[in-house]
Image (cartoon, helix red, strand yellow):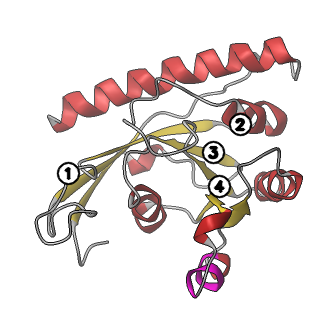
Amino acid sequence: MNGLWRPRVLGAWRVPATGPLILAGNHSHNIDGPMLIGTSPRPVHFLVKKEAFVGPLGPFLRSIGQLRVDRSGADRTAISAALEVLSGGGVLGIFPEGTRGVGDFAQLRAGLAYFAVRSGAPVVPVAVLGSAREGRVVSALPPLRARIDIVYGEPFEAGDGSGRRTRSALDAATTRIQEHLAAHLAEARRITGR
């Protein structure tokens, strides 16, 4: 990441040094995941769509601890693997919008709330800003040597403390998560001027 772009990491000290944790990032470009993996102060295990595990990229992704997920339905193997990461005190990375988009946290899927409530792991919001700009050399990538800001926010609990995992509890957790992530994104844009 440092060879191709100029990542600027802000707030990494907010990431707890130990214990289970979920990094929740906005997702507007393909390099957002690699940027978070490469700049996080702790190793991160992302749920990565199964289509990325083709050719030589598959063994590489597995070797760095990424988790293959079939997004066509509830992938129980991927869910179990993600919960194992958390129960082992690791860091699970999730793009709660489910796929690339505007990256504004406007439409969240319920997966993040499920993992946060089920595991009790705190959520750290992460804003990746500047990755969506198109370069002139390779239009599918940001301009070479462009600055990309990765801004970590304060950890928060997604659940209400009751331990309930009902549909209404998960819906309420999703609403809380969306509020925290949107507020963090607005603050990250303010401090970076993006």
Q: Which residue, given by chain and number where applicable, does mark 4 sit on?
A: 91
Q: Are marks 1 and 4 in contact (CB under 8 Å)?
A: no
Q: Which residue, given by chain and number where applicable, does mark 1 sit on?
A: 133
Judging depth in this view, the residue of 18 and 93 nearest the camera is 93
Q: Are marks 3 and 1 in contact (CB under 8 Å)?
A: no
Q: CA distance from mark 2 to mark 4?
A: 15 Å
Q: Is residue 128 left or right of residue 61?
A: left
The residues colored magenta run 56-61
Q: Is residue 53 left or right of residue 74?
A: left
Relative to 110, does residue 91 appear above or below in the rendering?
Answer: below
Q: Is residue 150 left or right of residue 112?
A: left
Relative to 167, does residue 59 appear above or below in the rendering?
Answer: below
Judging depth in this view, the residue of 153 and 4 nearest the camera is 4
Label 3: how many Cα within 10 Å (few below 14, some 14–19, many 20+):
many
Which of discs 1 and 4 lies nearer the camera? The answer is: 1
SS type, badge 1: loop
Label 3 vs 2, first from the N-terminus: 3
Label 3 vs 4, first from the N-terminus: 3
